[in-house]
Amino acid sequence: MAGRLDSNMQALKFLVIAMGVLIFAGLAVVVVTLAGRMSGDDGAPENGAAPFSAHDIALPAGAELRDATVADGRLVVRLAMPDGVTRLLLFDAEDGRPVGRFDLRPAP
């Protein structure tokens, strides 16, 4: 009976050690995964935007670029026109397509 008890204890010791190793390995995987996600370096821009691509924007003759701003997925370009009008050109910041144009004139 003592021999059978010793073999059972050895099997139980082996199982306890094996489960301890599995717990430790699983914990290590969780820690490494959390550390990788917290670093946030997945190669994508932080705001989730698409990678930058080049677009040509032709300015009207005589126009002078005054300002360019990006907000809410739109690129707003402010131009000073030769006739004194301030022109706002709106573009989609993701694909560069024109969205709208505003001419700001002084009130008469």
Image: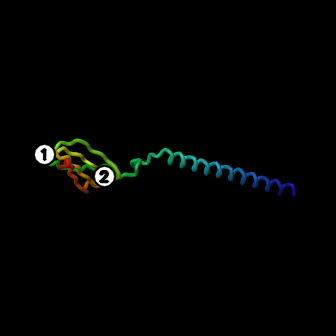
Residue visible at 39% across and 48% down in the picture: 45
Camera-nearest residue between 64 and 85: 85
> Looking at numbered disc 2 in the image, what kind of residue is underneath it?
Arg
The secondary structure type at the circle numbered 2 is: strand
Please name the residue that numbered disc 1 is placed on. 83
Residue visible at 17% across and 49% down in the picture: 108
Q: Earlier in the sequence, mark 2 or mark 1?
A: 2
The secondary structure type at the circle numbered 1 is: loop
Camera-nearest residue between 95 and 42: 95
Residue 84 percent across, percent down from the top left:
15, 44
79 shown above or below 4: above
Please tell me how crowded label 1 is: few (under 14), some (14-19), or many (20+) other residues with Cα within 10 Å: few
Please name the residue that numbered disc 2 is placed on. 74
For this view, does 2 lie left or right of residue 76? right
Camera-nearest residue between 57 and 74: 74
For this view, does 40 lie left or right of residue 84? right
For this view, does 18 lie left or right of residue 83? right
Residue 21 percent across, percent down from the top left:
66, 49
Residue 23 percent across, percent down from the top left:
65, 51
Which tag is nearer the camera, tag 2 or tag 1?
1
Tell me the quadrant of the picture where the N terminus can be found: bottom right
> Looking at numbered disc 1 in the image, what kind of residue is underneath it?
Asp
Whole-angstrom CA distance, mark 2 to mark 1, is 26 Å
Residue 58 percent across, percent down from the top left:
17, 49
Q: How many marks?
A: 2
